[in-house]
Image: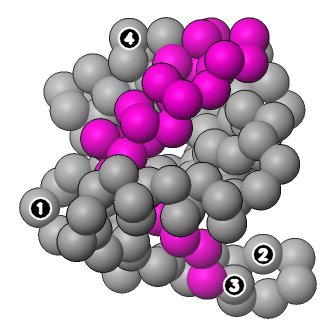
Amino acid sequence: MNKELIFQREGQEIRIIKDESGEPLFCLRDICDSLEMENPANIKNAILKEFEGAILNIHPFQTQGGIQHFTMITEPQLYFMLMRSDKPKARDFRQWVINEVLPSIRKEGSYSVGASNHALRH
């Protein structure tokens, strides 16, 4: 099973796993919730249209309701989402991912957070 990382950002969980080559995959539902995007299915369709031939990964996560399967998106697909959104939260989220999370994952294999945010490793 892939290593699961769960980050807390402004009260929202962001689940991230690494694929077979060590690249991060982001939970589409969590990103949509964090950016206040109302319809993950529409975002998923936009990603599939933009990235022709893309295959979206599905990953099981343990939830309060049992194991559920979530769509995971790649880093370029995440950037696509962030660039499409004009919501104020998108800019802050984009800066957090680009300047903190991804460099840390690449360098350390995980992300260390301050007192206001907590990373949980599974």
Q: Are marks 1 and 2 in contact (CB under 8 Å)?
A: no
Residue at x 49% of width, y 78% of height = 59
Label 2 or label 4, whichever lies nearer to me, is: 4
The residue under label 2 is which amino acid type? Answer: Thr
Q: Residue furthest left?
A: 21
Q: Quadrant of residue 92?
A: top right
Q: Which residue is mark 1?
A: 21
The residue under label 2 is 63
100, above or below 109, in the image: above
Q: Classify 10 Å Cα crowding around label 2: few (below 14), some (14-19), many (20 and above).
A: few
Q: Which residue is at the front of the view, 67 or 93?
A: 93
Residue 68 is marked as: 3
Q: Is residue 117 visible?
A: no
Q: CA distance from mark 3 to mark 2?
A: 7 Å
- Mark positioned earlier in the residue sequence (3 or 2): 2
Classify mark 3: helix, strand or loop.
strand
Q: Are marks 3 and 4 in contact (CB under 8 Å)?
A: no
What residue is rendered at 30% in x and 34% in y? Answer: 105
Is the residue under label 2 in contact with that under label 3 (CB below 8 Å)?
yes
- The residue type indicated by label 3 comes to Gln
Of mark 2 and mark 4, the one earlier in the sequence is: 2
Q: Which residue is mark 4?
A: 99
Q: Tag 4: residue type? A: Asn
SS type, badge 4 = helix
Q: CA distance from mark 3 to mark 4?
A: 30 Å
Q: CA distance from mark 2 to mark 4?
A: 29 Å
| Residue 118 percent across, percent down from the top left | 66, 31
Question: What's the magenta region?
Answer: 69-94
Q: Residue at x 80, y 24 (%)?
A: 10
Q: Is residue 42 visible?
A: yes
Dominant SS type (magenta)? helix
Quadrant assignment for the N terminus: bottom left
